[in-house]
Image (spheres, rainbow, N blue to C red):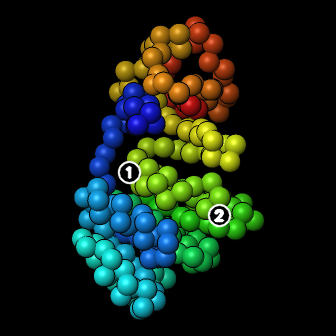
Amino acid sequence: AETTNVLEACGHPQTTTQEALVIGGGKTGFVVTRELERQGVNTRVLEKSRPQAEWLAQQLHRSTVICADALNKGVLLEENAPQMDVIACMTDNDATNMLTALQLRGLGMTNVIVLIKESNLLDMAAQLGIDQVVTPREVTAAKVLRLVRQGRVSQLYTLNEGRAEAVELEISAASPLVGQTVADLHLPYGVRLVALLEQGQLRWPTPELRLQARHRAIV
């Protein structure tokens, strides 16, 4: 809730995800899909294993389960992947998740969340331009859902083994924060403005500093 309030204050109204595609129906994919069902999101699940797909179809009541390989471009197009609000690549195979994300980007889909289990692949993911990454060590299925339900976040960092988060977001011209000084801010409980980025330059949030449109806030 705190993150949502900060997003709205920065001029990025909370939007509701209507259409989601979950790729991979394993443990994490199943939990994410079940919760999306509960929240009323129209969700499709792509699962390569037929036995697992059949099990998912029995457990999920409002989602559509498709037994197919997400690395097949034709399958992604058939399931209208480019028109989805968000896609979560949640298979148990890091390479599959990254390759699928790259293929989706080629189809014009940018809002893709990628599960990566091996920490030594995180740098590679960053080099490939995959910036919405979640890892089992840092992120629970509930946190994946929060990324799904939010937009407008440039980066989300998990600190101290998940005990805290730092979110980087841009202050839009429509934000009520524009023109306010740091001393005037009334951020939600537990939220602190840590730093501001202005044209690539780091600025510390001194009380007299006045916020401007296109400042990037780290909270």
Q: Residues within 10 Å of mark 1 (few under 14, many from 20)?
A: some
Q: Which-is-in-front pick, marks 2 and 1?
A: 1
Q: Which residue is mark 2?
A: 125
**Above/below status of 160 relative to 22:** above
- Which residue occupies the foreground of this view, 219 or 81? 219
Task: Give how far across and how far down residue 13 sits, in percent.
Answer: 33, 37
Tell me the residue at 33%/61% (across/down). Answer: 36
Circle 2: residue type = Ala
Q: Is residue 202 above or below residue 151?
A: above
| Residue 93 - label | none
Percent of width and height locating residue 160? 70, 43
Give the farthest residue toward the bottom: 50
Few, some or many residues within 10 Å of mark 2 (<14, 14–19, 20+): many
Relative horizontal placement of residue 38, taking residue 150 as reference (left or right): left
Quarter of the image where the C terminus is located: top right
Say which amino acid is labelled 1: Arg
Image coordinates for residue 2, horizontal then vertical, percent: 44, 33
Label 1, secondary structure: give it: helix
Comparing 35 with 103, the one in front is 35
| Whether label 2 touches label 1, CB < 8 Å | no
- Along the horizontal axis of the image, is 204 left or right of 81? right
Residue 79 visible in image: no
Quadrant of the snapshot with the N terminus: top left
Instruction: Give the total of numbered labels.
Output: 2
**Quadrant hosting residue 166:** top right
Where does label 1 land, which residue? 149
